[in-house]
């Protein structure tokens, strides 16, 4: 008897955090609240064929950019097992997965957020098909969180808050869309200055772990809440200067936390510091409202309003590109999407 397979295709973007999530507890709950911008071009596209047959393996094949990846298959099977209590359908599903990214491998861009957001979107769509119910984006965000914390923010358009700590906005269970931003925040750019493609010396899971015994833990949680508060107020009123100051403070705090944990990690490269210097000089001398943020790696994300793109490009080409292996121009995006 031939098995009956159905297909779902979904895509989800990566996101860049403005207030950083660093440290987790329990079942992927964040120690502090965070906010991010959803990207547009750095995407994972996932094509999944599924059938309901609990006698088959949960995942029969996992192809990533044309190659079978047994380690991805194992990781995703483990994830499906871990969520059985929350997503009971995973006991009955058998999946064939094909996945690809629109951004280059090892460009130092976190691909777990886009991959887990895409997979959670697929799972929710399958659930909606099987139960003849509506697709639920908050549920997709919650399932994405269980795969990779920051992935829960990638399903929403524009901006997303995750974590308790700010009245009425945000929950530890899933991300929520932040909609109340000033129109001047409706078209921001994220230009990613790749200073090194080297793989990270520290996985984010290990980094989150190191926050447990960290001397600055409590102060960090208070600071993140205060920063989130100020950043949201700035985004609501259109105050780009305050927004940018908080943005840079958050990036440098994340790295300060890594430098001062046991064991300690320095992920910034000399080029990262040179680029930071040039951005600050360029900002004051050229009067371009551009501010940096940094993830758990050496690459610098430059955030600025779209109307300055041509001037920023000129500045980067003249002063910064010598320090970079490559430059990716991304911008604010629409969140995850079901393509089929
Ligand atoms: O979602 P994870 O476990 O990969 O952690 C992401 C952590 C940061 O990217 C450094 C910050 C964030 O909020 O995205």
Image (cartoon, rainbow, N blue to C red):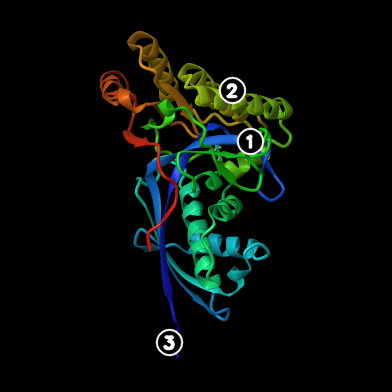
Which residue corresponds to mark 3?
2
Provide residue 147's location: percent of width, then percent of height.
57, 53
Q: Earlier in the sequence, mark 2 or mark 1?
A: 1
Provide residue 290's location: percent of width, then percent of height.
40, 21
Q: Can residue 58 be seen by looking at this rendering?
A: no
The verdict on label 2 being within 8 Å of ligand 1 is no
Which residue corresponds to mark 2?
230
The verdict on label 3 being within 8 Å of ligand 1 is no
Provide residue 110's location: percent of width, then percent of height.
47, 43
Which residue corresponds to mark 1?
33
Residues 3 and 325: in front is 3
Mark 2 → mark 3, Cα distance in angstroms: 58 Å
Which of discs 2 and 1 lies nearer the camera? The answer is 2
Dot 3 falls on a residue whose secondary structure is loop
Label 3 neighbour load within 10 Å: few <14, some 14-19, many 20+ = few
The reply, left or right, for residue 293 in relation to residue 171 is left
Label 2 neighbour load within 10 Å: few <14, some 14-19, many 20+ = some
Dot 2 falls on a residue whose secondary structure is helix
Quadrant occupied by the N terminus: bottom left
Q: Who's the residue at 49% across and 57% down the image?
A: 121
Mark 2 → mark 1, Cα distance in angstroms: 13 Å
Dot 1 falls on a residue whose secondary structure is loop
Mark 3 → mark 1, Cα distance in angstroms: 48 Å
Vertical position of residue 27 compared to residue 6: above or below: above
Vertical position of residue 14 compared to residue 194: above or below: below
- Count of numbered tags: 3
Residues 298 and 11: in front is 11
> Ligand 1 falls in which quarter?
top right
Residue 74, picture quadrant: bottom right
Residue 69, picture quadrant: bottom left
Vertical position of residue 338 compared to residue 321: above or below: below
Q: Who's the residue at 26% across and 24% down the image?
A: 310
């Amino acid at each position: 008897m031939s098995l009956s397979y159905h297909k779902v295709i979904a895509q989800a973007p990566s996101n860049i955090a403005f207030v950083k999530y660093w440290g987790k507890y329990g079942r992927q709950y964040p120690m502090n609240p965070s906010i991010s911008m959803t990207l547009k071009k750095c995407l994972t596209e996932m094509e999944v064929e599924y059938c309901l047959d609990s006698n088959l393996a949960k995942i029969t094949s996992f192809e990533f950019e044309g190659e079978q990846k047994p380690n991805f298959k194992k990781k995703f099977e483990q994830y499906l097992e871990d969520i059985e209590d929350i997503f009971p359908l995973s006991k009955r599903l058998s999946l064939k997965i094909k996945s690809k990214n629109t951004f280059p491998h090892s460009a130092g861009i976190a691909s777990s957020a886009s991959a887990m957001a895409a997979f959670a979107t697929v799972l929710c769509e399958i659930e909606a098909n099987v139960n003849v119910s509506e697709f639920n984006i908050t549920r997709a965000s919650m399932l994405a969180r269980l795969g990779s914390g920051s992935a829960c923010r990638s399903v929403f358009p524009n901006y997303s808050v995750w974590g308790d700590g700010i009245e009425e906005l945000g929950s530890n269970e899933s991300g929520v869309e932040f909609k109340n931003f000033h129109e001047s925040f409706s078209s921001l750019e994220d230009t990613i200055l790749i200073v090194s493609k080297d793989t990270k010396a520290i996985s984010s899971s290990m980094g989150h772990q190191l926050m447990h015994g960290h001397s600055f833990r409590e102060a960090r949680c208070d600071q993140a809440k205060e920063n989130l508060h100020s950043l949201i107020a700035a985004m609501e009123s259109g105050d780009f200067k305050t927004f940018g100051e908080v943005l840079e403070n958050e990036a440098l705090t994340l790295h300060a936390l890594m430098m001062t944990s046991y064991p300690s990690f320095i992920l910034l490269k000399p080029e990262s510091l040179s680029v930071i210097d040039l951005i600050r000089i360029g900002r004051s001398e050229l009067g371009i409202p551009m501010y940096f943020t940094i993830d758990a790696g050496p690459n610098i994300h430059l955030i600025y309003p779209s109307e300055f793109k041509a001037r920023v490009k000129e500045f980067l080409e003249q002063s910064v590109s010598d320090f970079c292996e490559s430059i990716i121009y991304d911008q604010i995006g629409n969140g995850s999407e079901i393509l089929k």
